[in-house]
Amino acid sequence: MIPDLSKAIVTLENIPADWIGLRAVRETVGYRNARDGKPQTNGTSLNQGVMVEALVKGQIGYGATNAFDLEGIQVAAHAAYQQALAASKWSIYPLTPDVRPKVVGQYISPYIRSLDALSPGEINDLLIRLCQTLQVSEKIVQTNATAITNETESWFVSSNGSEVYQKFLLLETHYGVTAQDGAIVQQRSNNGYLAHCYQGGWELFPEPDLWERAQRIGEQAVELLTAEECPATTTTLVLAPDQMMLQIHESVGHPLELDRILGDERNYAGGSFIKAADFGHLSYGSELMNITFNPTVAGEFASYSFDDTGTPATREYLVKEGILLRGLGSLESQTRTGVLGVACARASSWNRPPIDRMANLNLEPGTDSFEDLIRNTESGIYMESNRSWSIDDQRHKFQFGCEYAKLIENGKLTKTLRNPNYRATTPQFWHSLSRVGNESTWQMYGTPHCGKGEPNQAIRVGHGSPVCVFDHVEVFGGGV
Amino acid sequence: MTLMESAVLETANQEATFNRLVDALLSELQPNEYAKLELTGEQSQFIRFNTAKVRQAGCISDGELRLTLMGDRRIAYHNLPFTGRWETDWQQAHMSLQVLRQELPQLPEDPYLVLPEGNATSRDVYTGRLLRPESAAAAILPEVMGLDFAGIYAAGSLIRAYADSAGQKHWFTTESFSLDYSLFTADGQAVKDTFAGNEWDAVSYAAKLADSKQRLERLSRSPKAVPRGQYRTYLAPAAVAELLGMFSWGGVSEASLQRGGSAFKLLRRGEKQLSPAFSLTENFQRGLVPRFNDWGEIAPVELPIIQAGKLLNTLINSRTAKEYGKPSNGANGSESLRSLKLPLAICLPLKFSRRWIRAYIFPTCIT
């Protein structure tokens, strides 16, 4: 493909652009889902196309086509040129080819068993058996299990000599139940909806403890039907990594996106309470807070070597010892703001322009074991698995809900609580971070559904975190 | 030739290519095989705005064909690119059929499989008068110069089509535009609105902006602090649209109600009711969205969902109907609202969606 795109670039020399780039993407997806032990969806997809970027008079124009051939690329390139030329009279900021430096390289996801190692029949057998295992009681009114395979290849070639090939093998799995007793309905799942998203192959699933976990999930859903409501109080909150994932994503990732700070996203995704002038000195959280942008973690969902503009990806601290250092911004956004950023210009596919996105955003581990974290909490609540979320358009005030909680009394986990929720403001919450679990408590998850952008783009992100303790947090149950 | 001009020519060929693919694929079916084909496509332009300037602008030519094969009580689908070029698309589609034939015997039986039946056909083509792609920014931005204006302009042609082995066939295309925007005050408060339709009219656009500017002026006045408490609250149509969008998140879906996934279970059980001032209807009269669903069935022109605060009907598709023994009312696969309407229509936001188009009509509401 690289030679084909390089030849195509040569045929575009008659277009008077300052820079032209071609990004081709081919995505092959298998989607399989069972509900209540019966097949619900068995589908496969091939999606492919080319995005042409043309830089003209400081403005980048985009032309995308799913015609995967020279003629299609040429038509798309002329469209990109015309769009750039027309928009250049109204350009928000004059860009130069410096935002698309030359780069050559490749990346391939680490894997052991390829994504075609299991047949459609074998995958269905697994999902159906999962549903059956989850069905621990007649109070379980729905069981479901999903497996999604995704092999995505991308090729990036530019008029200044860039040549990048990247191949991603992705496996997303989910299973969970709905339990009902009269008007009471509770859900329990494997760490939240589709949280098990990783790079790799079928070595990731089934996990050795799959059946035991499924049994426990079914039992916990039934347990929640008769559990006490989460009390409305202010207390110590202990969050599991499968909820920290959402916490990091919504209250650290999104507010640090430079395009939100620049106002590009205000009509849809929103802005940010962070200002460009805050970087380098703002105290974002307690000294225990260390957040890295890390696309180098093997197996994490959004690892890569280059973003979709070819910028080499490296691990960077966004927040170190509580101080805000760097934003989630591409070279374009860095140029516009003067703020340090990362390699995060990403597009959901060939038919969307790259914008500032999270990739892997992780909270670095601390020193305490899980047992120590609980033992040192006299009174509090431990919450697991995201169930709902709501946060304002500036990413300042939020309210999140979890599937499952335990009361902590005198340093011990005691009663199960249902409908656990908590609310806070972002600076207050992160400054209340009082203890951070060690490496043994660190877990990573992901989601393919981070939404942003106009036209809308859903993209994959990964988040890793240890168990964390937050002091003086307002918690409440389902009736408040 | 520009991509959009090329797209116009290609759009003219796409129906012919789709029909030819349908004929060719269906003629390949064995006697015990059933199939359906669903097409989505777009030839569109987008411009993103921030501070009344252009952030990003581009054109997209895209299409996807879903081939679903059924037989021996089993079902599987394959999505493939649809370019409108016969040679390319036929090669892919034929290969997809072979892949599905290999896969089908490996799958478990589906007890709720809905085979194609019926003889519904339709052909709806809505042409429009859109801005030329290279002149769109110049037509939009002068009206908002000096304002903090952000949003997206999207325009072009959309295709939705369906055909199956029972002989049902539908074709729907529309040319339309949507300018979804916000005007901001100095302290970040926003007037949010949408200017959308099939024909761009500069006079109507100027009138729309004049109204938005007036609201912005009101919003820019010093705010009055309101203590926490209960108030009669006026919600603008855009806000009502956001609220009602949640009704599609399993809210009035029969399947969701059956499986504990709807927030309206107490409404269904008659233990609660909404305000008697609230009624909600699925209404296709304006013809802005296709009435056919994932099985080629035609939905009724009008279906009351909530009447005077009570749940009157739920959305039921054929699969749910089979599973729970209920009559289908032509709902789509996800049993979501496609063309909902409240009484007293005063606003029409039209949004582009990847798989389906939805049109919502909302009045201002008081809560």
Image (cartoon, rainbow, N blue to C red):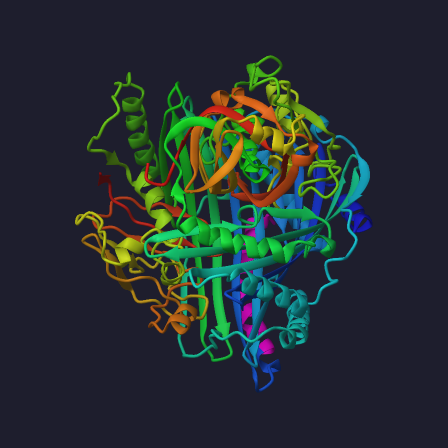
What is the x, y in percent for residue A108?
78, 46
Query: Which of A64 and A247 lies nearest the eye of the viewer?
Result: A247
Q: Is residue A229 above or below residue B219?
A: below
Quadrant (top left, top right, bottom left, bottom right) of the C terminus of chain A: top left
What is the x, y in percent for residue B240?
30, 42
Query: Which of B195 and A224 lies nearest the eye of the viewer?
Result: A224
| Residue appearing at x 37%, y 62% in the figure | B258
What is the x, y in percent for residue A403?
47, 44
- Count of marks overlaid on the render: 0
Query: Which of B190 and B280 lies nearest the eye of the viewer?
Result: B280
| Residue appearing at x 28%, y 18% in the figure | B223
Residue B350 lies left or right of residue B301; in this view the side is: right
Residue B222 lies left or right of residue B77; in this view the side is: left
Residue A385 lies left or right of residue A397; in this view the side is: right
| Residue appearing at x 65%, y 74% in the figure | B106
Q: Is residue B261 above or below residue A296?
A: below
Q: Farthest residue in the top direction? A: A281
Task: Please indicate, yes or no, whether residue A79 appears anywhere in the rendered image.
Answer: no
Q: Quadrant for residue A244, please give it.
A: top right
Identify the magenta region: B1-25
Residue A250 lies left or right of residue A113; in this view the side is: left
Query: Which of A389 and A435 lies nearest the eye of the viewer?
Result: A435
